[in-house]
């Protein structure tokens, strides 16, 4: 794979991933969305389908890693570090691009995210917080517990992804990406409750940067004090999964 193919593939694939993922979060969260309040299961499947679409699209160009934690896990196992920086750069740029595209899809809903007057003496409805559309927010803010959650959840992603590579039939049949997508859905349903399962540093950092920069009405804080956890946790989890895979398999 050429450097250009790797960069373009990761940008496009990660942009599609975030478009779907941030898109489903916007659909469930924002006022005047037809999918508003449809719940966690919808979010988990939306992210899974984002992985499916993004990885299949990027696979011919870059292999469709789309996640710095996966990239590091592969590098730790194989010892090939020369193009890691290129994958990471493409993933971050793609994540930012995907967040902007999701914002544009829901532009009218973001613009309508203002205080709504109450009816018949009811209290006014406050604007919907928007950071959770772009990045993760812990349900209980506990840095140690949140970091542990992200490390374990990322290991639960990267270790199976590496092991799936041993099953040649998955790659030959073209179903490998489908299985990984279902794995992401499973992680969201089972392990996503505490922190929102970033499990991907680019997925959290890129959209958080975009949230900071975009002119979103009533957007509130981008919570940079928490932002290191969904970056460091998945990176540590990816490295540990790569080491474990290298030693055990």
Image: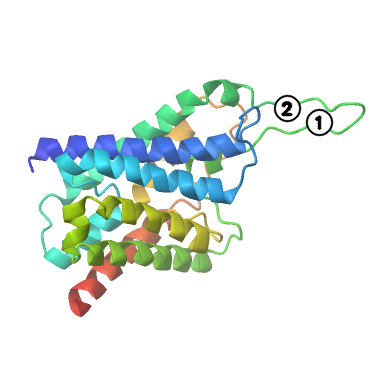
* Residue located 51% across and 63% down the image: 190
Snapshot quadrant of residue 57: top left
Residue 204 visible? no
Q: Is residue 79 above or below residue 34?
A: below
Q: Residue furthest bottom?
A: 248
Relative depth, front residue between 205 and 109: 109
In this rendering, would 130 be left or right of 55?
Answer: right
In which quadrant is the N terminus drawn? top left
Residue 60 relative to residue 39: left or right? left
**Residue assigned mark 1:** 124
Seen at 23% across and 40% down, the residue is 58
Closest to the observer, 171 or 229: 171
Q: Residue at x 24, y 47 (%)?
A: 88
**Residue 5 appears in the picture as rendered:** yes
Side of 162 where 234 appears, left or right:
right
Q: Residue furthest right?
A: 121
Q: Is residue 139 left or right of residue 44?
A: right
**Image quadrant where residue 128 sits:** top right
Q: Which mark is residue 185?
A: none
Question: What's the residue at 13%, 49% (across, down)?
Answer: 83
* Residue located beneath label 2 in the image: 115
Specify the farthest residue to the left.
2
Camera-side residue: 178 or 48?
178
x and y percentages locating residue 2 in the rendered image: 7, 40
CB under 8 Å between callouts 2 and 1?
A: yes
Whole-Å distance between the Cαs marked 2 and 1? 7 Å
Of the image marks 2 and 1, the number of the one nearer the N terminus: 2
Q: Quadrant of the C terminus?
A: bottom left
């Amino acid at each position: 794979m050429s450097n250009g193919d790797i960069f373009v593939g990761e940008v496009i694939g990660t942009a599609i991933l975030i478009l779907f993922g941030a898109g489903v979060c916007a659909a469930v969260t924002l006022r005047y969305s037809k999918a508003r309040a449809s719940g966690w299961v919808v979010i988990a499947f939306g992210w899974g389908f984002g992985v499916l679409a993004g990885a299949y699209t990027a696979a011919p160009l870059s292999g469709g890693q789309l996640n710095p934690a996966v990239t590091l896990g592969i590098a730790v196992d194989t010892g090939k570090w020369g193009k890691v920086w290129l994958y990471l750069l493409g993933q971050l740029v793609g994540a930012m691009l995907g967040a902007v595209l999701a914002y544009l899809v829901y532009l009218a809903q973001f613009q309508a995210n203002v205080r709504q007057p109450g009816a018949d003496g009811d209290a006014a409805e406050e604007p919907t917080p928007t950071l959770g559309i772009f990045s993760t927010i812990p349900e209980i803010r506990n840095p140690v517990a949140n970091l542990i959650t992200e490390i374990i959840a990322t290991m639960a992603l990267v270790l199976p992804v590496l092991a799936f590579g041993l099953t040649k039939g998955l790659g030959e049949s073209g179903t490998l990406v489908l299985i990984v997508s279902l794995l992401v859905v499973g992680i969201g349903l089972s392990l996503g409750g505490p922190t929102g399962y970033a499990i991907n540093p680019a997925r959290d950092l890129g959209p958080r940067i975009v949230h900071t920069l975009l002119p979103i009405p009533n957007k509130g804080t981008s919570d940079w004090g928490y932002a290191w956890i969904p970056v460091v946790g998945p990176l540590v989890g990816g490295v540990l999964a790569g080491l474990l895979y290298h030693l055990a398999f």
